[in-house]
Image (spheres, grey):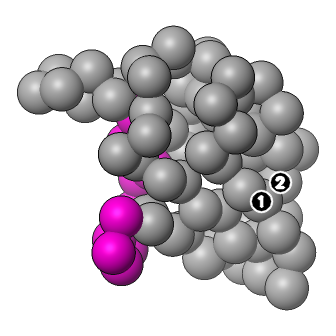
Amino acid sequence: MVVITLQRKKCIGCNYCVELAPGQFRMSKKDGKSVLLKAVDKKGFHTLKSSDHGILETSEAAAKACPVNIISVKLK
């Protein structure tokens, strides 16, 4: 299981996550911040749990590229 978490409120809208993992992230037209697709929001932490290990590499690249370190990727 791949678990991706985004702290959306801290997003600065740099767009790196969308460039590196377009299957998981989009930029919001409303506020210019990143949106983790198909995620569940719990107290500002948007979490996606997926059994698709194919998203691991791109998601990790997005997390490493994030200048404010608000994306975490874990294997469970």
The residue depicted at 82 percent of the width and 69 percent of the height is: 74
Q: Is residue 74 above or below residue 64?
A: below
Q: Does the CB distance between marks 1 and 2 fall below 8 Å?
A: yes
Quarter occupied by the C terminus:
bottom right
Residue 60 percent location from the top left of the image: 83, 44
Mark 1 sits on what residue?
73
> Is 9 in front, or is 16?
9
> In the drawing, does residue 76 fall left or right of residue 51?
right
Residue 25 visible at all: yes
Q: Residue furthest bottom?
A: 76
Query: Which three-letter amino acid code belongs to the residue tagged 1?
Result: Val
> Please, what secondary structure does the residue beneath circle 2 have?
helix
Residue 54 visible at all: no
Residue 35 among those drawn in magenta: yes
Residue 70 percent location from the top left of the image: 61, 45
Mark 2 sits on what residue?
56
The residue depicted at 25 percent of the width and 30 percent of the height is: 28
Query: Which three-letter amino acid code belongs to the residue tagged 2?
Result: Leu
